[in-house]
Amino acid sequence: MKKICTLTATVLLASSMAFGGSFQLNLQGIRQTAMGGTGVAWPWDASTIFFNPGGLSRLSGIQAYGSVNIVTPNVKYVQTPTGGYSASSNTHTTTPFAVYVGGPIRKGSKIGVGLGIYTPFGNKLDWGNTWTGRYVVESISLQSFFFQPTVSYAINDMISVGAGFVYARGTVDIEKAIPVQDINGNDGQAKLKGNANGFGFNVGVQIKATEDLQFGVSYRSKVKMDVNGGDATFTVPASLAGNFPNTTFDSKLPLPEILTVGLGYKFTSDLMVQADVVLAGWKTYDSLSFDFAENKSVQDTHDPRSYKNTVAFRLGAHYQIDNQFAIMAGGAYDPTPTRDNLLSPDAVDGNRLTLSCGATYQPLPRLSIMAALNYTTTPKRNTSYDPAGMQGAYQVKSLLPAIGVSYTF
Amino acid sequence: MKKSYLLIAASAALLTFSCKSKIDPEMPSAGQADFSTYVAIGNSLTAGFADGSLYRSGQENSYPNMLAGQFKLVGGGDFRQPLLPGESGWPIAPAAGRFPKRVLDIVVDCKGVASLGPKLYSGLPDTAGSAVNIAAGGPYNNVGIPGIRCIDYDVAGYGMANPYAGRFFSSPMQRPLEAALQPVPTFFTMWLGSNDVLGYATAGGEGANGGIGLSDISPLPVFTATYNKVVESLVNSGRSPKGALINIPDVTAIPYFTTINPKGLVLDATQAAQLSALYAPLGISFTEGPNYFIIEDSTAPGLRRQIKPGEYILITTPGDSLKCGGWGSAKPIPERFVLDAAEVNNVKVATAAFNQVIADNANRHGLALVDANTYLKSLQSGITWNGVTYTPAFVTGGAFSLDGIHLTPRGYALVANEIIRMINQTYQASIPNVDVNKYGGVRFP
């Protein structure tokens, strides 16, 4: 009758820190962002360190580049099948940024070197601590910083290649409620906070077929982010504190390999159009597991995610108005890697449709000031997250401005 | 330069797109039913009984009150409940076996071991005014009466025998059925019949199988006649209501009967040898580790035997007697705390027969049938709802309150959603689910 020392029922239902489809940030260059995320075939500026390291040796000189994006996604949940309950995520702004320095080591050199620091994956989503899915997730914050030293070599006038080594650092911060209530009805709370590390590489080839036609291929490897010894902190009613000792946890977060193939074509000396096809190896994100150092009431968790590989299509155009001004526009279709029955509210995603535009201004030949605007929406999507018995329809919308500046030495 | 103004204009146009997501729930619909006056008929489960008593917040978290809240989205009207004033539980009369509600606390057993367990609420009772008749505030939509059986439902004067009924019945001679018809329902739910087997089971099966005593299983003909009459009276009442009939859960699947493990007599080698010696004349031997408890059985040699799998020891068996009083080993556990195989069979046969009567009524009158029996059995393998998994485990399972029979608010909310599911299906309605996580579960100190 009183054998309730082991609270097996109150296992932490596996939490989730999906670097899901919606957490892939295609925001590593302003011009590219403005052109629907395209950019593998053309070395626009030092951001080619990310988009295609092969282009780095093609720049006109060493360039310093910085950009910042203002991301404020809005996600709405509506209970299904019968509606009735809905919730919107609290809005938080994150600012993914990119900094690049690099180019040919001297004027006319075939060798380019550079360093890029950028944030290819990240997310902040806060549902609050009263919403119906709080036992799955209250808030999640993911950050990643990739440091990429890069070398590039122009084999001849046609072909240039490049390679970068990636060192990734990340942080993860998840909060969720635990279904044990104190005398006043307050839920228990779990907080998982940790740092992650990983390694990878980025290689690319650019082919200048003619003055007007270029091709590009880039491959960014999978980066396995390992969280070792993250802090798991639990707040529970006093009588259960012994069952929920604060402990540490390990986890692994695979960031997928990405292959991009694209071309760019100059229709006129002013108008250029480029298109990319992006294959993302999301299949690697099969499940999300947390291994807690001390297991009492908190059991290790293993959440199926079963992501699918995706193929995204991007299209962009660039129009040079005069020596100082250029405008850009583009669009993209990114199918989601998530499955309809495994969509967790901590990694909401759907097939994304993106429209974008932007402009650059060159007050001096060496200085560019850039701005872009990106609008992304997903259609309403009926899903469930079967491990948590949670059904719902979700929609994501975001309007994302970005600014940047570059200076060529 | 002109073109860059165009760009700015285009950007501004983009900005005027709202970046807020605009999806909305579908408009709920009442379908073919009319929820303007909803009446909930039933026993303690319907009244919102929990933790061994009836108290105000339990009533506020009754499943009929949850349903009424959802019905309001599709034209439902006010829903009056005969609310008690206080939280301590009522009535409190230990001599009559009526105790305040139970709360979870640290309990020290006879061996000095402290653990979490249910304990009687020890604060000052806030029951003043509970016994005052509140019929003037009616008619009441929730006419759930703790303790009522199906066979009581057409008995004049029932309110004089049951204080929960007496406090809101409009006259001492009012029949429960009359109280149910008083608001003139357009829709009703009826979860009646559990007490026609439960009283027998909670008394350890010592009553009669087919009697009208409180510890008996109700006679099937009386049950059938009363159930038929109640449903007919309802569907033929003034506003020809539609409704949902909820069947009887198999009481042997609830923590009241499943919490104490029959094979819970844990012995060391010495104890096993001593008991084996003691029971040698009866041919019973014990081994080191877990053994089946010894129970009283008037038909067994020596009037005792080991309990068998499929038989149950009631949660009310004094824990200290098991741990320190030699119960279940040197002394048999008294029969009134045990549901043996024959008694279990009586319960199961009666439950099946009563449920057949309920299903027949649903078919005959085209009413929704909610198979609470099957639904609550599915708790065995766990019901997961928005991140929380519920099981029938006592305290930790989250679905059952501290009396091991009645549900927690979250348990009631799960049942409410199952009822909504069947109402939607039967009447082509689209009533939204209750947000289970809005309600509370077991509260820990």
Image: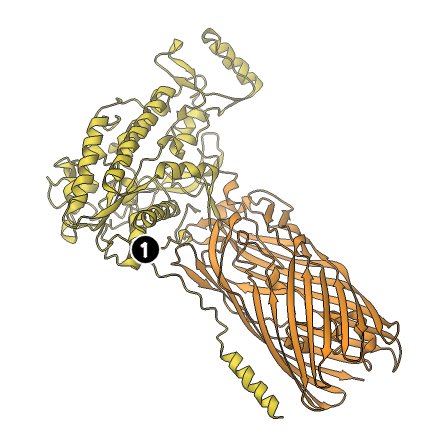
Chain colours: A orange, B yellow
Residue marked by disc 1? B70
Assign the N terminus of chain A to one quadrant of the image: top left
Answer few, some or many: residues within 10 Å of disc 1's Cα (few below 14, many 20 plus, some between 14 and 19): many
Q: Is residue A396 visible?
A: yes
Q: Nearer the viewer, residue A281 or B417?
A: A281
The residue lying at 31 percent from left, 57 percent from top is B29
Residue drawn at (61%, 61%), measured in percent from left and top? A21
Q: Name which residue lies at 65% across and 76% down.
A: A316
**Residue B27 versus residue A66: which sits nearer the camera?**
B27
* Quadrant of res B352: top left
On the rendered structure, is B88 left or right of B232? right
Residue B392 visible in the picture? no
Q: Is residue B269 above or below residue A363?
A: above
Relative to B37, say whether B321 is above or below: above
Chain identity of mark 1 = B
Picture quadrant of residue A211: bottom right
Residue B101, x across and y down, in percent: 33, 42
Residue shown at 28% from the left, 53% from the top: B68
Q: In this rendered view, identify the residue nearer to me: B71 or B235.
A: B235
Using residue A300 as the reference point, say whether residue B373 is left or right of it: left
Look at the numbered disc 1 and give the secondary structure of its residue: helix
